[in-house]
Amino acid sequence: MVRYLPLALLTLLSALCVESRAQPKHEPTETQVDKSDVAALNEFINQGHLGVGDSANQPKPKTLNSEISKGNDSDSKDVMEPLVLSQSNDSDSESEDDQEKEDSWRIYLDLYAFLPPITNSTSTIEGNTTKVDLPLSDVIKSLDEALTLKAQFEYGRLGILAAMNYATLSASTTQSSFLETQNPLKNRLGIAPSLRTRTIRIQGDLDVDVDANQTIFDLAMRYRAGAIQKPRMEKGSTSFLGLVGARFIDANLSTDFNIKGKTDVTVEGVKVSRSNSRELERSSNASWGNTWVQPMVGMFGTYAISEDWQAFAYLDAGGFGLSGSQDLSGTAQAGIAYALGNSAQISLSYKYFGIAYFEGGSENNGYSSYQSGVNLGLRWLFD
């Protein structure tokens, strides 16, 4: 019995060691032994169940160590399993959050002001061509109404873009002479056309009133590759949009000519007949208008310089000569943007926009306009 007493104590200590080893190192280990368990062990020994002659029933140390080892592995596994399961749940949660952000609606609203220093335009009405180069100050003075905005709707990676550029202009000028090729009244004067330029001089005031309006509406499907476009993006992240759609254009030009007072008209020093002079005193009007559709493709790329600063570039092209003898429009733009909080952004860029449209036929009515300059923008994100 005395020989087996150390073995029983060893078994009890081994179990306690296994329990202590399974607990974290940073937490204090407390070992509690019930007094009833100790009394039961003493009674078991006193009754002679652990006799000297029971050597055959003595468990081998190797077997005992194996059982202890198994118990230790089992306990360690139970302790570590919650940590492994916790890490897996965190990863799944992050993946679900990213997917939820991707599969949600986002709305972008852009307002911008395009300020080209010079606007170069050419218009042809009933075969008469007029070329005008207007500085920005004259354009602002002549501007009656203007609206420039862009809205984009995105769900996941697919979306829709809608943009509008609307403007009406009215200008007046007074002239005392003009070229024959720019004179809408040349047929009334009975002057035969010539290969050289003729100058018609009017001794009096010729008032010219010009009214023009242009509406450009873009509607396109868009697909995004890369990160979601936001005012604040992770440094180094990129986003790319591809656009395919149509550009709807409505343009109208109207020119009124009025002669003030009784005038004498000469052509290269030769006085025009009195009847033609009286005819010229009357007013005349020439106008042209058309609505057409252009196929359009485009792209928009963004690169996050830092969390708040972004560089971007935009390109589009439409027309490709499908609707007239000349039919083409396009935009090229590049600049930087700065975040105003998490839902707003301002931008500064350099922009070029050009449009040229002329009908087929002998009169070849139409117009062209080319602008380049600074563009100021403001964007809001709703998600």
Image: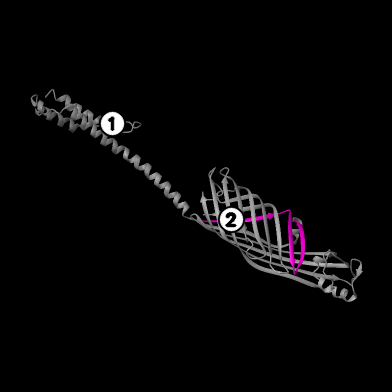
Q: Nearer the viewer, residue 65 or 266?
A: 266
Snapshot quadrant of residue 198: bottom right
Residue occupying the point 27% across, 36% down: 75
The residue beneath circle 1 is 20
Q: From what the image shows, is residue 21 above or below residue 188?
A: above
In reply to whether residue 72 is colored magenta, the answer given is no
| Neighbour tally class for label 1: few under 14, some 14-19, many 20 plus, Cα within 10 Å | some
Residue occupying the point 77% across, 60% down: 132
Q: From what the image shows, is residue 2 above or below residue 286?
A: above
Q: Main secondary structure of the magenta part?
A: strand
The residue beneath circle 2 is 298
Labels 2, 1: front one: 2
Disc 2/disc 1 C-alpha distance (Å) = 68 Å
Q: From what the image shows, is residue 140 above or below residue 226?
A: below
- Residue extending farthest to the left is 53
Q: Are circles 2 and 1 on residues that touch, CB within 8 Å?
A: no
In reply to whether residue 120 is colored magenta, the answer given is yes
Q: Which three-letter amino acid code belongs to the residue tagged 1?
A: Ser
Q: Which three-letter amino acid code belongs to the residue tagged 2?
A: Gly
Q: Position of residue 186 (x, y in %)?
A: 82, 70
Residue occupying the point 68% across, 55% down: 114
Per the image, label 1 sits on a secondary structure element best described as helix
Q: Give the residues in magenta.
A: 106-135
